[in-house]
Amino acid sequence: MESEDSAIGKLEFDGGYPTQPTMTKLLGEMDLMRATDAYLWGIPAAGMIEWKNAQNNVFKIQDGQLVSYITQKQKQGILTPNYTTPYIATFADLSKTGPIVLTLPKGLMAGMVMDVHQRVLEDLGVVGPDKGEGGKYLFLPPGHEPIAPEGYFVIPAKSNIVFFGVRLLGKDKAEAVKTLVPQISTALYKDGKLGESWPVLPAGEQPWSQTPRTGMDYWKSINQLVQQEVVEDRDRFMMEHLRSLGIEKGKPFEPDANQKTALEKGAVLGQAMAKANNYAKRFEPPFWKGTHWKHAITVSTNQRAENWDQFDERASWFYEAVSISKAMLTQTPGVGQRYIVTYQDKDGNWLTGENTYKLHVPANVPAKQFWSSTVYDEKERQMIVNDEKAPDIAAGKQGLKENADGSVDIYYGPKPVKGFEQNWVQTNPGDGWFTYFRFYAPTEAFFDKSWTLGDIEKVK
C-alpha cells in the first residue's frame, strides 16, 4: 500500500491502483471541479435566461415585444443598472418567432444587440450603423438563409435567444420618453413582409429579478440554456462536463445523488469564486495609479483575446452586471460611455453601510454629457434601496452643492452630513456596497488620465 499527500487529503494506492475510498474521493473532486467551472462559465447566460423568464412569466410580455424600464422600481431587478436614463429592451427566442425587425427613430439613444452569452452582435443608435438617424434592424435566427432586403440593417444571430435594447440619452428624460418611445417598435418579418408593429409596454412595478438564482435553481437555468440553444464549438468541452453532472441536451434534468451533491456544492463554491474573481480583478490594474478604482467592464464585446477566450473576465463583469456594447468601451473622446468601479476605501477596507465616506470629485469632470456615481448593494448587485429612494449622485442634480473651485464632495453613509444633504447617498448599516463612476461621452482628459479621481475616504 502506498500513499501520497494532496490538496484534497491523503490518497492511497494498492499496486498503483487507487483504493476504493481514494477513487470515490478523486471522482467526487473531479465532479466538483467541473461544477465550479460550469458555474463560472454559465454566469452570462444565466442572467439572460432569468431576465427572459421574467419578461415572459412576470411581465406577461411575448417574445420580441419591447419593454420600458424608467422608474427605479421597474429597474430594480436589473444587475447594476444606470439610474438616470430610461431603458427600452426585450428578448426574443428566434427559433420560435422567426426573423424580427426593430424600428428606431432618429434621436439620441444608444444600445446593443447581444446573444444569450452576452456577446455583442451590433451596437444600436448613435454608435450603431444608423448613427442616430434611425432605421430598421432585421434579426435572423441561427442558420437562416442569408438575406439583404433593401433598407434594413441585417444582423444574423449566433443563438436562438437574443437581447436588444437602447437607452435614451437626452438631458430631458421625460421629453425623451414622450417623443421617442412611441416611435420605437418591433414586428415579425415573414416572406419579405413586415407584420403588424408591436408598441413598447411598461415593465410594471411588481418585484422581479434577473440575478442568476442560487443552489439547484441555478442549474435549472443552465439546463434551460442547454436545451434551448445551439451548441458552439467553443463550448463542447463544457457540454461534456455538464453531461457528467446530469445536464445533457435532449434529456431530462434528473441528476442522481452524486451528481446532485456535486451541483449543490459547486453552486456554493462557484458563487464564492465568482465574488473573489470579481472583487480582486487580478487581470485588471488600477485605473488611476495608487487608487482602488478599476475598469468595471473587464471583458471584450466578443469575449476574445488574441490567444484565448476571456473566461475569468467575462465571469467578473457578468457576475455583477448585465449587458455590454462597443459604446460602453469607447476609445473615442466625446462618444459612448466608460465605467470605473471601486469596492474599497482609501485604506483598502470594503465599503460598508454603517460608515460615512467622502469622495472628492475634482472640477472639470471629463464627461461631455454628464457624470454619475451610482451605489449598488453587494449582495444583490442591484441599485441600493434606501429610505431616500435615491441611489445616485449625478451632474446636474437639483441642489447639488459645488465647492468654490467647481469640485464636488459626495458623501455616502447612513445619515446626511450637515450642509451636504443633496450631495449624499444613503447606505444601509451592515450591508456592503460599491459604486460605479460613469462618464457619459468621456473626453480626452479621461483617456490620457490628466484628470484623476482619488479614493473614497472614511470620515467621522
Image (tube, rainbow, N blue to C red):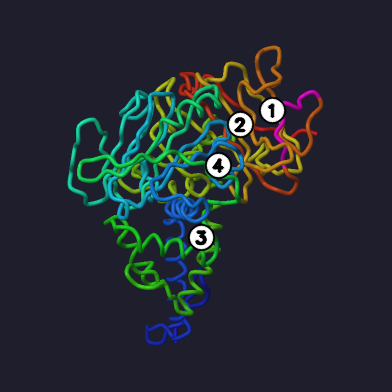
Crowding near pointer 2: few (<14 within 10 Å), some, many (20+)? many
**Mark 1 and mark 2 residues within 8 Å of each other at the beta carbon:** yes
Q: Tell me which residue sits at (74%, 40%) in the image.
A: 387
Which residue in the protein does label 3 denote?
Answer: 270
Q: Which mark is residue 373?
A: 2
Q: Quadrant of the C terminus?
A: top right
What percent of the width, then of the height, locates residue 242? Answer: 38, 67
Amino acid type, residue under disc 3 in the picture: Gly
In front here: 264 or 183? 183
Residue 357 lies in what quarter of the image? top right
Q: Which mark is residue 80?
A: 4
Q: Eyeballing the image, is 95 above or below 216? A: above
Q: Eyeballing the image, is 421 above or below 142? A: above
In front here: 337 or 189? 189
Cα–Cα gap, marks 4 and 3: 20 Å
What percent of the width, then of the height, locates residue 115? Answer: 35, 47
Q: Secondary structure at mark 2?
A: strand
Crowding near pointer 3: few (<14 within 10 Å), some, many (20+)? many
